[in-house]
Image: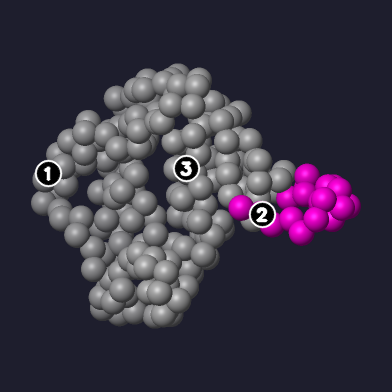
Amino acid sequence: MKQKLVVIIFFFAFLAFPQTFLSQTNSKSQKAAKISKSKTDKEKLQAKKIMEQFIDGVFVQRKIVETFDRLTLFEACDKVDEDWELECFLKEQPAKLGHKTDSRIAVLLWRREFGGIYYILGTDPIPKDNEAYPYSSAEFDAIRTEVFKKNNFSEAFQGKGNKLEIEKRLIQVETNYDETEDIVFQRIDKSLYDINIKRMKNSITVEKFI
């Protein structure tokens, strides 16, 4: 499974460099660039809106699955990915699980790797300059370990079995992460969290676009 629309990668690149949201574009000539200026401005605005929608969905509304379901597209890994040495998660995952289930698996991977950002946003101000901002937290890891131990739960996830078995496992994972995040939001400074969210949204600057 790979993410064709790399919203997540862009987002964490944005956290590392909060003043700029960068990707790549190709202009054939100065004349063509002038002619397409209005189109360019429109597409820059669309790119900014995608980032704002991601931030709102994941961090404000905390509807992660719905956000991933709407803003991401997944396809099976193929030879092209292997040639480019792109990382392929859950290589043995059954095909045709459906976009919704694929999105839930992607959210699981996101929570496992980047879930600590919730705790950080409520405890560590985002710098006003271009300094990198962390997305992992030992404190969050400790809370997660505490919850998983209490529930006698292991977060190891294998995309094996039929769709029913995989979705049953997903429910277990989601329940434990929901409990973890509930504890996080009881402990963080919610005012600082809100300030950091506004800081993220206000710092989005689209210089180039795909």
Q: Amino acid at mark 3?
A: Ala
Q: Amino acid at mark 2?
A: Thr
Query: Residue, x 22% and y 31% (percent of image)?
Result: 139
Quarter holding residue 44:
top right
Quarter holding residue 82:
bottom left
Residue that extends furthest to the front in the rendered view of this protein:
29
* Left or right of 119 on screen, residue 132: right
Q: In what quadrant of the picture does the N terminus appear? A: bottom left
* Left or right of 135 on screen, residue 5: right
Mark 2: few/some/many CA within 10 Å (<14, 14-19, 20+): few
Asked if residue 146 can be seen in this view, the reply is yes
Spot occupied by residue 152 in the image (x, y as percentages of width and height)? 11, 51
Residue 149 among magenta residues: no
Q: Nearer the viewer, mark 2 or mark 1?
A: 2
Spot occupied by residue 204 in the image (x, y as percentages of width and height)? 60, 35
Label 3: which secondary element = helix
Mark 1: few/some/many CA within 10 Å (<14, 14-19, 20+): few
State the separation of the CA atoms marked 2 and 1: 49 Å
Disc 1 target residue: 150
Q: Which residues are magenta?
A: 24-43
| Sequence order check, earlier mark of 2 and 1 | 2
Disc 2 target residue: 25
Q: Nearer the viewer, mark 3 or mark 1?
A: 3
Disc 3 target residue: 13
